[in-house]
Amino acid sequence: MKYLLLLVFLTISINVAQSQVVYRDDGALTDSAELRLLYDESIKVLDSTNRTGLHIERLDILEVGNDKYLLPNGAMSVYKWRNNTWHNICKGANRGFNYGNKAFVHKGKIYCWGGYGFWRGHGMLIVFQEDLGEWELLPFTGELDFMYGWQTPTGLFAFNADSSIEINIDDQNIRESPEGLRNDFPILEPLHWYEYDFKNYYLIYITKAWLIEKSTGQIYESDVVAFRHYVKNGKGMFRIFGDSVTYFKGDMDHRFDLSVKDELQFFNKKEQNSDKQFYVIFFVSLALMSTIVPMIIYRKRKRKKSELITSKDEPHSWDNKYLEALLLQQGNILSVDELDTILEIIDVIPAETQRFKRSNLIKEINRLYCARYDVDLIFRKQDVEDGRKYVYQIGNE
């Protein structure tokens, strides 16, 4: 039975996910006494949150330096561990925006990626600003669809059945991954509840268990789901440390330790696409590119030349009332309230929705302006008088 312990927590995750606490122990291994206290206090948070009517499927414990944080998935609350209990440090009241998100730490900040909200699955990234006690959307991810994936030194590697990309948090950009996964994964639900991000491996349960070796992209699969009698146990904790996972039963007196590498023998390699299929696709794509790309380039140059001539002779219509209003503010620095007044969102509530609308409007205005002048119109800067606030410079960057 010991050899199949890798899949214990998958079974429990699926069947009793409402009591699941996942602790990414990135520092020195936490002792059993502190683990018990962390778990007991986490269950208190779970119980209090469920009484509000919000059904929590998973709670993640993350470490930032020597501090520990608890994130009830989908609630958007952030609890900090102080004096042997959890204290909510999030001031926002919004919830349900990212049910089933992937919570993680990148360079000292807490992020949540993707999930389900606003009646759709999405791949947006939000970052928690602890000094403000609020979440902030990263605008460059505003159009991303839901994807699965794991952490990288610069952000995230993400994939679904159609493509694979690299999300660079440091440089705030996204690019296609030329060495992405070639295998199709059925995306049944836009949720990260059933995935575990180890140091060198990524484990995900969709219709079966898949284990991916990050360095090579090799995929392993298993149809086995063992230890079904543990489903009746109820509450439990999963501690991830490197490439190992420990499952603690609800009473915290029984534990099961295992290593991902030891369990590889119970997985089968998933065959990659054959070389023949690869070369057929490659040469067909090459033939199409050789005829289509030159035509696209020619039309683009012709259109650009025509637009340049038009822009010199005729006044330009932006077809965006907010952009035209902001052109009158060029050279000025606006406060958040002044900008929101121009964008007609000053009365939007809650604050999280207001920030999302502001971010999307700024993105669209800069897109239109940049297409003509190759530079953004709106620049977000830190207030020199109050470093906790931001202001917006209009033009002249």
Image (spheres, grey):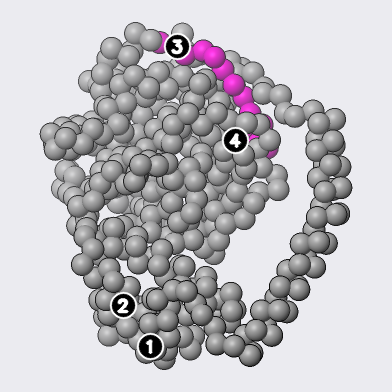
Alpha-carbon span between mark 1 and mark 3: 65 Å
State the residue at coordinates (47%, 74%): 319
On the question of residue 71 being in view, the answer is no
Q: In front: 356, or 62?
A: 356
Disc 4 crowd, CA 10 A, few/some/many (<14, 14-19, 20+)? some
Question: Magenta stretch: residue 74 in it?
Answer: no
Q: Which residue is mark 2?
A: 342
Q: Say which of marks 1 and 4 sits in front.
A: 1
Is there CB contact under 8 Å for labels 1 and 4?
no
Disc 1 marks a residue whose amino acid type is Gln
Q: Say which of marks 2 and 4 sits in front.
A: 2
First reached walking from the N terminus: tag 2 or tag 4 = 4
Where's residue 92, x and y in %?
22, 56
Where's residue 255, x and y in %?
34, 20
**What range of the chain is rendered magenta?**
213-227
Disc 3 marks a residue whose amino acid type is Ala
State the residue at coordinates (59%, 21%): 221
Alpha-carbon span between mark 2 and mark 1: 10 Å
Q: Which residue is mark 4?
A: 161
Q: Residue furthest front?
A: 314
Is there CB contact under 8 Å for labels 2 and 1?
yes
Residue 241 location, quadrant: top left
Alpha-carbon span between mark 4 and mark 3: 27 Å
Disc 2 crowd, CA 10 A, few/some/many (<14, 14-19, 20+)? some
First reached walking from the N terminus: tag 1 or tag 3 = 3
Q: Secondary structure at mark 4?
A: loop
